[in-house]
Image: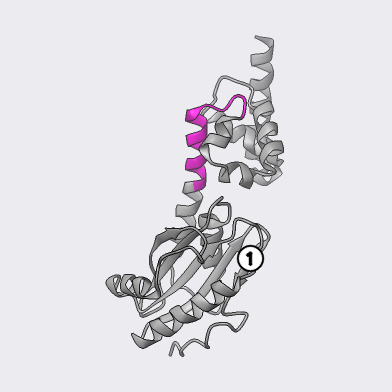
């Protein structure tokens, strides 16, 4: 009973701090503690929060961890593992919803936020397309393949077919490097330039290609690998 009252009182103090000063006053382990209480309401979640941080390095690392890795943590059951994955998916969908605003192609912070939420913590490579309308507004996204680009069997023709089917006038390509280094390989560069040339034949613009990694991102446009974009009028 003493233990129960102890961690219950601790939770109440954390809630009071949030009420008085907002979420920014919480340390990472405290934030994670409260997050875990949603699926573990009757247990002290502080030790579990610390274990998650030590094992995965950060809150982002814990949310990015796959379900089997989460289940290896003492105190984490299937319900809690699914809840943590739900939190990550919620953030991805939130940032995707933000893209419904008109994208300013000179400042792509919203796109990068989405790309980070979608791909940066993945343990294998994903290739995703962001379809854009003629007014350069976000339409929707689609994951086309997994595996390194050098192993991807997708030919540029397949991607162009997807863009035409979506009735999009342009697109942004994004893939991730689980190694942590966003630098493109020679194969990445050759493949991207081939895709850009194929898109141009059909009057379609490849606006950007991002590589996302834990240490940052690489922009093909900012590094002058892609041709200058057409005027937006």
Is 87 in the magenta?
A: yes
Residue neighbourhood size for the residue with mark 1, other residues' Cα within 10 Å, grouped as few (<14), some (14–19), many (≥20): many
State the image quarter where residue 188 is shown. Answer: bottom right
Q: Is residue 107 placed above or below 142 in the rendered structure?
A: below
For the residue pair 223 and 187, the one nearer the viewer reads as 187
**Residue numbers of the magenta segment:** 73-88
Q: Measuring 50% from the left and 65% from the top, which residue is drawn there?
A: 149
Residue 194 at x, y = what percent?
Answer: 46, 80
Residue 134 at x, y = what percent?
Answer: 35, 80
Image quadrant holding the C terminus, namely: bottom left
For the residue pair 213 and 24, the one nearer the viewer reads as 213
Q: Measuring 60% from the left and 33% from the top, which residue is drawn there?
A: 34
For the residue pair 90 and 22, the one nearer the viewer reads as 90
Most prominent secondary structure in the magenta stretch? helix
Image quadrant holding the N terminus, namely: top right
Q: Measuring 48% from the left and 53% from the top, which residue is drawn there?
A: 92
Residue 38 at x, y = what percent?
Answer: 52, 31
Q: Is residue 216 placed above or below 40 in the rendered structure?
A: below
């Amino acid at each position: 009973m003493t233990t129960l009252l102890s961690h219950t009182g601790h939770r109440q103090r954390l809630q009071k701090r949030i009420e008085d000063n907002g979420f920014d006053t919480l340390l990472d382990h405290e934030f994670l503690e409260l997050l875990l209480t949603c699926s573990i309401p009757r247990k002290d979640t502080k030790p579990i929060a610390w274990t998650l941080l030590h094992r995965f390095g950060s809150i982002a690392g814990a949310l990015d961890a796959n379900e089997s890795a989460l289940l290896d943590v003492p105190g984490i059951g299937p319900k809690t593992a699914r809840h943590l994955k739900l939190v990550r998916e919620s953030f991805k969908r939130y940032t995707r919803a933000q893209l419904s605003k008109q994208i300013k192609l000179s400042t792509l912070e919203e796109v990068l936020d989405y790309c980070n939420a979608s791909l940066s913590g993945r343990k294998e490579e994903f290739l995703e397309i962001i379809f854009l309308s003629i007014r350069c507004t976000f339409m929707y996204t689609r994951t086309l393949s997994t595996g390194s680009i050098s192993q991807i069997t997708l030919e540029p023709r397949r991607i162009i077919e997807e863009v035409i089917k979506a009735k999009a006038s342009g697109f942004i390509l994004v893939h991730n490097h689980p190694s942590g280094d966003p630098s493109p390989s020679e194969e990445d560069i050759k493949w991207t330039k081939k895709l850009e040339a194929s898109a141009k034949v059909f009057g379609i613009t490849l606006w950007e290609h991002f590589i996302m990694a834990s240490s940052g991102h690489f922009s093909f446009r900012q590094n002058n690998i892609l041709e200058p974009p057409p005027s937006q009028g």
